[in-house]
Amino acid sequence: MPGASPGAGRVTPNREVGEKAREGHPVVFVLDKHGTPLQPTSPARARKLLRKGRAAIARHTPFVIRLKDRTVSESQVEGVELGIDPGSKHTGIAVFTAKDGERRGLYAVELAHRGGAIRDKLTARAGYRRRRRGRNLRYRAPRFSNRTRPKGWLAPSLRHRVETTMSWTTRLARWAPVRAVHVERVAFDTHAMSSGGPLEGAEYQHGTLHGTEVREYLLAKWERTCAYCGTTGVPLNIDHIHPRSRGGSDRISNLCTACVPCNEKKSNQPVEDFLKQSPRRLARILAQAKTPLRDAAAVNATRWALWRALDTSFDTVRTASGGRTKWNRQRTGLPKTHTLDALCVGHLDTVTRSPAHVLAVTATGRGTYTRTRPDKYGFPRQRLPRHKTFFGYQTGDFARAVVPTGKKTGTHTGRIAVRANGSFDIKTAHGLVQGIGHKHFRLLQRADGYAYTTRPEGPTTTQLKQGVSTKEVR
């Protein structure tokens, strides 16, 4: 049946003998002839529907088809659920089906935010304005009294994370019948970590859900390395920088990650004595230990704003903590990635299937409003065109170029960069091809402010270097 859930009837993995959730190809989203989402289907079934002429391509990335001969009333739609793992730089989104505590991952999206770029641009703009005011070029009445912030205000770099995540959840809801959304609302309890509540006595040695938020925060703060020797990819303990036996507290500012040899060698020595031969490393550790909880607070503020936005857009929104997500992921034997964390958000018993590939989405923006390029003093030095569209195309469009003759003979498919002279560049999977005439192009999908790539599911190179997939704090 078109729109049927792929791979039904799979056997639950037996964790006692080391069986893991099987991997499968990401599903294809299906719409009925009126544009209403149906149950996603397998790529093989989608190819058959397209080959028989029963379906047409509605979107290329993500791949969505539209049936020509079926409506939602004639189909069996079980519905899907979304899992969201919000982060500072990346957000994982998983589409899955859930039945009797078993989850089957159907599709995975890793969304890369551009909050850092927004922050840098705002900082540069503020610097330009400050220098212009300081040069006393012209008088302008002060406007700081007019700058009021409404209730719930977020900095633009933080608001961007909420808006892009909401944009993709609503997009997925247009392509798939979303019945519920699971989201992490709390990752790090900054108040509890500051007061030393979660780490009393020897509680930092406990496992499962106990103290997970603190351990995850310390892993992120110390970049999953030993604070004393810089070793990575090994089991790490939580160590008191100033020993408790010498009056050290359990506050988060007095904790760091340490490998087993360093932890045993340091014992209850003051950190100044332990690192007296390495004064530069000692200074770095003391400075990093006093780093405020700014990152954790920013993530928490974003998660709460995201939850409020989701709660107004979807009927069923369930929340969970980062500790629950980590516990679920460890029980199911999955490696740590943003998308697999999203698959493990909330209450579940087991994961029977996970997508083999992830759609990596990068927020690139839709261009710029500025019509000039400034020099180092903030004055305009170059004028830009007043419009972005040339010959019906704009930079970022997904198109196919069929070149019949010449050095660039062949078919090229990818994102294009337009030029006013009609000679476009196209970036394909095989590289950049420059100087193709606009008459050879055919538009496939309009630019939507995102860049797309597909990669296999699993830890990235950076995560493997940090030992994320195999090593956790003991």
Image (spheres, rainbow, N blue to C red):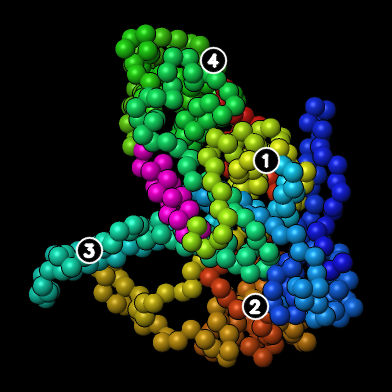
Vertical order, 67 against 96 (above or below): below
Q: Which residues are magenta?
A: 293-310
Marks 1 and 4, Cα distance to the nearest angstrom? 37 Å
Q: Earlier in the sequence, mark 4 or mark 3?
A: 3
Q: Earlier in the sequence, mark 2 or mark 4?
A: 4
Is any atom of residue 253 visible in this view?
A: no
Q: Earlier in the sequence, mark 1 or mark 4?
A: 4
Is any atom of residue 194 visible in this view?
A: yes
Residue 279 in the image, given as x and y percentages of width and height: 34, 22
| Residue type of the residue flagged with mark 3 | Thr
- Residue appearing at x 70%, y 70% in the figure: 37
Q: Quadrant of residue 286?
A: top left
Nearer the observer: mark 4 or 3; the answer is 3
Where disc 3 sits, the SS reads: loop
Label 1 sits on residue: 348
Marks 3 and 1, Cα distance to the nearest angstrom? 44 Å
- Residue appearing at x 69%, y 32% in the figure: 331
Pointer 1 with pointer 4, Cβ within 8 A:
no
- The residue nearer to you, when weighing 223 against 252, is 252
| Residue type of the residue flagged with mark 2 | Gln
Residue 350 in the image, given as x and y percentages of width and height: 73, 39
Is 20 placed left or right of 472 in the picture? Answer: right
Where disc 2 sits, the SS reads: strand
Marks 4 and 3, Cα distance to the nearest angstrom? 54 Å
- Residue appearing at x 87%, y 67% in the figure: 1
Q: Quadrant of residue 3?
A: bottom right
Q: Earlier in the sequence, mark 3 or mark 2?
A: 3
Disc number at residue 148?
A: 3
